[in-house]
Amino acid sequence: MNFLTGKRILVTGIANNHSIAYGIAQALHRAGAELAFSYQNKKNKLRLEKFAKNFNSNIVLPCDVTKDTSIKELFNSLAKIWIKFDGFIHSIAYAPKKQFKGDFINVINRKSFTIAHDISSYSFVAMAKASRYMLNPKASLVTLTYIGAERAIFNYNVMGLAKASLEANTRYMANAMGPQKIRVNAISAGPIKTLAALGIKNFKKIISYYKSVIPMRRLITIDDIGNTAAFLCSDLSSGITGEIIHVDGGFNIVAMNELNL
Ligand code: 0WD
Protein backbone atom coordinates (compact mmCIF):
# COMPACT_ATOMS: atom_id res chain seq x y z
CA MET A 1 0.00 0.00 0.00
CA ASN A 2 2.11 2.88 -1.25
CA PHE A 3 -0.51 5.59 -0.91
CA LEU A 4 2.06 8.10 0.40
CA THR A 5 4.66 7.60 -2.32
CA GLY A 6 6.06 10.98 -3.35
CA LYS A 7 4.99 12.72 -0.10
CA ARG A 8 7.58 14.36 2.13
CA ILE A 9 6.56 14.66 5.76
CA LEU A 10 8.29 16.09 8.83
CA VAL A 11 7.71 14.21 12.09
CA THR A 12 8.21 15.94 15.46
CA GLY A 13 7.98 14.56 19.01
CA ILE A 14 9.79 11.22 18.96
CA ALA A 15 11.24 10.77 22.45
CA ASN A 16 11.68 6.98 22.11
CA ASN A 17 10.14 4.01 20.30
CA HIS A 18 7.06 4.12 22.56
CA SER A 19 6.23 7.67 21.45
CA ILE A 20 3.04 8.12 19.45
CA ALA A 21 5.15 9.92 16.83
CA TYR A 22 7.24 6.76 16.43
CA GLY A 23 4.12 4.74 15.55
CA ILE A 24 3.16 7.48 13.12
CA ALA A 25 6.62 7.44 11.48
CA GLN A 26 6.34 3.66 11.05
CA ALA A 27 2.95 3.96 9.34
CA LEU A 28 4.05 6.86 7.10
CA HIS A 29 7.15 4.90 6.09
CA ARG A 30 5.13 1.73 5.35
CA ALA A 31 2.90 3.79 3.06
CA GLY A 32 5.92 5.08 1.11
CA ALA A 33 6.45 8.61 2.50
CA GLU A 34 9.89 10.24 2.70
CA LEU A 35 10.50 11.42 6.26
CA ALA A 36 12.40 14.11 8.13
CA PHE A 37 12.58 14.38 11.92
CA SER A 38 13.04 17.06 14.53
CA TYR A 39 14.23 16.67 18.12
CA GLN A 40 13.91 18.97 21.10
CA ASN A 41 17.31 18.72 22.71
CA LYS A 42 20.73 17.21 22.20
CA LYS A 43 20.09 14.22 24.47
CA ASN A 44 17.58 12.91 21.87
CA LYS A 45 19.81 13.57 18.84
CA LEU A 46 21.78 10.31 18.67
CA ARG A 47 18.75 8.15 19.41
CA LEU A 48 16.74 9.93 16.73
CA GLU A 49 19.53 9.58 14.16
CA LYS A 50 19.42 5.83 14.79
CA PHE A 51 15.61 5.72 14.43
CA ALA A 52 15.77 7.82 11.26
CA LYS A 53 18.00 5.20 9.62
CA ASN A 54 15.21 2.62 10.15
CA PHE A 55 13.07 4.90 8.02
CA ASN A 56 15.74 5.44 5.32
CA SER A 57 16.16 9.05 6.42
CA ASN A 58 19.18 11.08 7.42
CA ILE A 59 17.27 14.31 7.95
CA VAL A 60 17.37 14.94 11.70
CA LEU A 61 17.13 18.57 12.79
CA PRO A 62 16.89 20.38 16.14
CA CYS A 63 13.82 22.40 17.12
CA ASP A 64 12.72 23.71 20.50
CA VAL A 65 9.22 25.08 19.84
CA THR A 66 9.43 27.55 22.73
CA LYS A 67 11.76 29.67 20.57
CA ASP A 68 10.69 31.31 17.30
CA THR A 69 14.32 31.40 16.18
CA SER A 70 14.58 27.64 16.61
CA ILE A 71 11.40 27.04 14.58
CA LYS A 72 12.73 29.35 11.86
CA GLU A 73 16.08 27.57 11.81
CA LEU A 74 14.34 24.20 11.50
CA PHE A 75 12.58 25.24 8.30
CA ASN A 76 15.60 27.13 6.93
CA SER A 77 17.67 23.95 7.34
CA LEU A 78 14.90 21.76 5.91
CA ALA A 79 14.54 24.08 2.90
CA LYS A 80 18.16 23.33 1.98
CA ILE A 81 17.18 19.65 1.58
CA TRP A 82 13.49 19.82 0.62
CA ILE A 83 12.50 23.03 -1.20
CA LYS A 84 8.86 22.02 -0.75
CA PHE A 85 7.19 19.39 1.40
CA ASP A 86 3.77 17.85 2.06
CA GLY A 87 3.05 18.32 5.72
CA PHE A 88 4.09 17.71 9.29
CA ILE A 89 3.09 15.76 12.36
CA HIS A 90 2.89 17.90 15.50
CA SER A 91 3.27 15.46 18.41
CA ILE A 92 4.40 17.89 21.08
CA ALA A 93 2.95 18.76 24.46
CA TYR A 94 4.26 19.89 27.82
CA ALA A 95 3.12 21.25 31.17
CA PRO A 96 5.14 21.35 34.40
CA LYS A 97 4.92 17.98 36.16
CA LYS A 98 3.22 19.33 39.32
CA GLN A 99 0.21 20.29 37.20
CA PHE A 100 -0.69 16.63 36.63
CA LYS A 101 -1.40 15.88 40.25
CA GLY A 102 -4.36 16.89 42.39
CA ASP A 103 -7.12 19.47 42.61
CA PHE A 104 -7.22 21.63 39.46
CA ILE A 105 -8.00 24.90 41.26
CA ASN A 106 -5.24 24.34 43.82
CA VAL A 107 -2.48 23.47 41.36
CA ILE A 108 -3.20 25.83 38.45
CA ASN A 109 -1.11 29.00 38.21
CA ARG A 110 -0.49 31.67 35.59
CA LYS A 111 3.00 30.50 34.68
CA SER A 112 2.04 26.85 34.10
CA PHE A 113 -1.05 27.94 32.14
CA THR A 114 1.16 30.00 29.83
CA ILE A 115 3.80 27.28 29.38
CA ALA A 116 1.20 24.57 28.66
CA HIS A 117 -0.61 26.67 26.06
CA ASP A 118 2.59 27.91 24.46
CA ILE A 119 4.21 24.49 23.97
CA SER A 120 1.09 22.39 23.44
CA SER A 121 -1.08 24.68 21.30
CA TYR A 122 0.72 27.79 20.01
CA SER A 123 3.60 25.68 18.68
CA PHE A 124 1.26 24.03 16.14
CA VAL A 125 0.29 27.30 14.44
CA ALA A 126 3.82 28.68 14.93
CA MET A 127 5.19 25.78 12.88
CA ALA A 128 2.53 26.34 10.19
CA LYS A 129 3.30 30.06 10.11
CA ALA A 130 7.02 29.43 9.64
CA SER A 131 6.63 26.74 6.95
CA ARG A 132 3.59 27.92 4.98
CA TYR A 133 5.69 29.07 2.03
CA MET A 134 7.27 25.60 1.75
CA LEU A 135 4.05 23.57 1.82
CA ASN A 136 2.80 22.00 -1.41
CA PRO A 137 -0.88 22.20 -2.33
CA LYS A 138 -2.61 19.12 -0.81
CA ALA A 139 -0.24 19.24 2.16
CA SER A 140 -1.64 17.92 5.43
CA LEU A 141 -0.89 18.99 9.00
CA VAL A 142 -1.78 16.64 11.85
CA THR A 143 -1.67 17.18 15.61
CA LEU A 144 -2.44 14.99 18.65
CA THR A 145 -5.09 15.77 21.24
CA TYR A 146 -6.93 14.00 24.06
CA ILE A 147 -10.49 13.74 25.37
CA GLY A 148 -9.39 15.84 28.37
CA ALA A 149 -10.06 18.79 26.02
CA GLU A 150 -13.77 17.94 25.92
CA ARG A 151 -14.38 16.56 29.39
CA ALA A 152 -12.87 17.14 32.83
CA ILE A 153 -10.42 14.38 33.76
CA PHE A 154 -8.95 14.36 37.25
CA ASN A 155 -5.17 15.07 37.21
CA TYR A 156 -5.13 16.06 33.50
CA ASN A 157 -5.80 19.62 34.67
CA VAL A 158 -4.20 22.49 32.72
CA MET A 159 -3.34 20.19 29.81
CA GLY A 160 -7.08 19.79 29.20
CA LEU A 161 -7.30 23.54 28.65
CA ALA A 162 -4.26 23.54 26.37
CA LYS A 163 -5.73 20.68 24.31
CA ALA A 164 -9.05 22.56 24.00
CA SER A 165 -7.02 25.49 22.64
CA LEU A 166 -5.18 23.12 20.28
CA GLU A 167 -8.50 21.79 18.94
CA ALA A 168 -9.79 25.33 18.28
CA ASN A 169 -6.42 26.11 16.72
CA THR A 170 -6.92 23.12 14.36
CA ARG A 171 -10.25 24.56 13.14
CA TYR A 172 -8.88 28.10 12.69
CA MET A 173 -5.79 26.81 10.89
CA ALA A 174 -7.95 24.60 8.63
CA ASN A 175 -10.11 27.59 7.75
CA ALA A 176 -7.12 29.85 7.07
CA MET A 177 -5.13 27.31 5.05
CA GLY A 178 -8.03 25.75 3.11
CA PRO A 179 -7.81 28.26 0.23
CA GLN A 180 -4.13 27.20 -0.14
CA LYS A 181 -5.43 23.58 -0.41
CA ILE A 182 -3.73 22.64 2.86
CA ARG A 183 -5.67 20.47 5.31
CA VAL A 184 -5.33 20.54 9.10
CA ASN A 185 -6.68 17.84 11.42
CA ALA A 186 -6.24 16.46 14.92
CA ILE A 187 -6.29 12.90 16.22
CA SER A 188 -7.82 12.49 19.66
CA ALA A 189 -5.94 9.44 20.88
CA GLY A 190 -6.91 6.97 23.58
CA PRO A 191 -4.43 6.71 26.49
CA ILE A 192 -1.12 5.07 25.60
CA LYS A 193 1.81 4.36 27.96
CA THR A 194 4.48 6.81 26.82
CA LEU A 195 7.02 8.92 28.71
CA ALA A 196 4.70 11.93 28.69
CA ALA A 197 1.68 9.93 29.85
CA LEU A 198 3.52 8.29 32.75
CA GLY A 199 3.96 11.79 34.23
CA ILE A 200 0.19 11.93 34.87
CA LYS A 201 -0.61 10.68 38.38
CA ASN A 202 -2.50 7.35 38.39
CA PHE A 203 -2.11 6.94 34.63
CA LYS A 204 -2.12 3.14 35.01
CA LYS A 205 -5.54 3.37 36.69
CA ILE A 206 -6.79 5.52 33.80
CA ILE A 207 -5.65 2.79 31.41
CA SER A 208 -7.37 -0.05 33.26
CA TYR A 209 -10.63 1.92 33.67
CA TYR A 210 -10.51 2.77 30.01
CA LYS A 211 -9.99 -0.82 28.94
CA SER A 212 -12.98 -1.93 30.96
CA VAL A 213 -15.49 0.51 29.45
CA ILE A 214 -14.58 1.06 25.83
CA PRO A 215 -16.65 -0.74 23.20
CA MET A 216 -13.58 -2.43 21.68
CA ARG A 217 -12.35 -3.70 25.10
CA ARG A 218 -8.73 -3.30 24.07
CA LEU A 219 -6.18 -0.56 24.34
CA ILE A 220 -5.30 1.67 21.46
CA THR A 221 -1.76 1.24 20.12
CA ILE A 222 0.67 3.57 18.43
CA ASP A 223 -0.05 1.53 15.26
CA ASP A 224 -3.76 2.48 15.44
CA ILE A 225 -2.79 6.14 15.71
CA GLY A 226 -0.10 5.79 13.03
CA ASN A 227 -2.50 4.31 10.49
CA THR A 228 -5.01 7.13 10.99
CA ALA A 229 -2.24 9.73 10.68
CA ALA A 230 -1.08 8.10 7.43
CA PHE A 231 -4.65 8.29 6.11
CA LEU A 232 -4.89 11.96 7.12
CA CYS A 233 -1.56 12.76 5.42
CA SER A 234 -2.71 11.08 2.21
CA ASP A 235 -5.01 12.12 -0.60
CA LEU A 236 -7.40 9.37 0.59
CA SER A 237 -8.65 11.93 3.15
CA SER A 238 -8.83 14.78 0.61
CA GLY A 239 -12.26 16.00 1.78
CA ILE A 240 -11.44 16.11 5.50
CA THR A 241 -10.18 19.24 7.25
CA GLY A 242 -10.62 20.92 10.63
CA GLU A 243 -11.72 17.63 12.20
CA ILE A 244 -10.92 16.10 15.56
CA ILE A 245 -10.85 12.36 14.80
CA HIS A 246 -11.20 10.08 17.81
CA VAL A 247 -8.93 7.05 17.68
CA ASP A 248 -9.90 5.78 21.11
CA GLY A 249 -11.69 2.47 20.57
CA GLY A 250 -15.02 4.30 20.93
CA PHE A 251 -14.44 5.60 24.49
CA ASN A 252 -15.91 9.01 23.67
CA ILE A 253 -19.29 7.60 22.60
CA VAL A 254 -19.98 5.69 25.81
CA ALA A 255 -21.70 7.14 28.88
CA MET A 256 -22.16 3.81 30.68
CA ASN A 257 -22.01 0.11 29.93
CA GLU A 258 -22.83 -3.11 31.72
CA LEU A 259 -19.49 -3.17 33.57
CA ASN A 260 -20.41 0.07 35.37
CA LEU A 261 -23.78 -1.25 36.63
O1 0WD B 1 -1.86 8.71 26.23
C1 0WD B 1 -1.11 9.40 25.54
N1 0WD B 1 0.19 9.18 25.52
C2 0WD B 1 -1.71 10.49 24.71
C3 0WD B 1 -0.89 11.45 24.15
C4 0WD B 1 -3.16 10.48 24.52
C5 0WD B 1 -3.64 11.54 23.67
C6 0WD B 1 -2.79 12.49 23.14
N2 0WD B 1 -1.45 12.44 23.39
C7 0WD B 1 -0.60 13.47 22.80
C8 0WD B 1 0.32 14.21 23.76
O2 0WD B 1 -0.37 15.16 24.51
C9 0WD B 1 1.30 14.83 22.77
O3 0WD B 1 0.71 15.96 22.16
O4 0WD B 1 0.25 12.92 21.84
C10 0WD B 1 1.42 13.72 21.71
C11 0WD B 1 2.66 12.87 21.85
O5 0WD B 1 2.66 12.31 23.13
P1 0WD B 1 3.49 11.03 23.60
O6 0WD B 1 3.94 10.24 22.44
O7 0WD B 1 2.68 10.44 24.68
O8 0WD B 1 4.72 11.75 24.31
P2 0WD B 1 6.30 11.56 24.35
O9 0WD B 1 6.73 10.25 23.81
O10 0WD B 1 6.76 11.86 25.74
O11 0WD B 1 6.74 12.77 23.43
C12 0WD B 1 6.32 14.09 23.65
C13 0WD B 1 7.43 14.93 23.12
C14 0WD B 1 8.61 15.19 24.03
O12 0WD B 1 9.26 14.16 24.49
P3 0WD B 1 10.01 14.30 25.96
O13 0WD B 1 9.47 13.11 26.68
O14 0WD B 1 11.45 14.28 25.61
O15 0WD B 1 9.55 15.61 26.58
O16 0WD B 1 7.07 16.28 22.90
C15 0WD B 1 8.28 16.92 22.59
C16 0WD B 1 9.42 16.08 23.12
O17 0WD B 1 10.07 15.36 22.10
N3 0WD B 1 8.41 18.24 23.17
C17 0WD B 1 8.98 19.26 22.51
N4 0WD B 1 9.49 19.34 21.25
C18 0WD B 1 10.03 20.50 20.87
N5 0WD B 1 10.09 21.57 21.67
C19 0WD B 1 9.00 20.35 23.40
C20 0WD B 1 9.59 21.55 22.94
N6 0WD B 1 9.69 22.64 23.71
N7 0WD B 1 8.43 19.94 24.58
C21 0WD B 1 8.06 18.67 24.42
Image (cartoon, grey):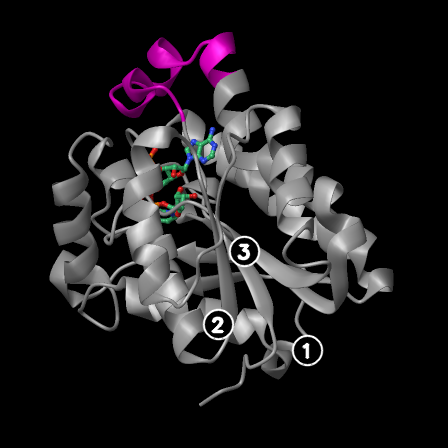
Mark whose residue sits in front, 3 or 1: 3
Q: Circle 1: is it few (<14), some (14-19), or many (20+) Cα within 10 Å?
A: some
Image vertical order of residue 16 relative to residue 199, above or below: below
- Report the quarter where the N terminus lies: bottom left
Q: Which residues are magenta?
A: 95-113
> x, y (%) of residue 57?
43, 62
- Report the quarter where the C terminus lies: bottom left
| Mark 3 Cβ inside 8 Å of ligand 1 | no
Mark 1 lies on residue? 238
- Which element carries disc 1, helix, strand or loop? loop
* Residue type at tag 3: Leu
> Alpha-carbon distance for marks 1 and 2?
12 Å
Q: Quick check: 173 left or right of 117?
A: right
Please say whether residue 99 is one of the residues in the magenta stretch.
Answer: yes
Mark whose residue sits in front, 2 or 3: 3
Q: Residue at x 69, y 50 (%)?
A: 79
Mark 3 lies on residue? 10
Q: Main secondary structure of the magenta part?
A: helix
Mark whose residue sits in front, 1 or 2: 2
- Which element carries disc 2, helix, strand or loop? helix
Mark 2 lies on residue? 230
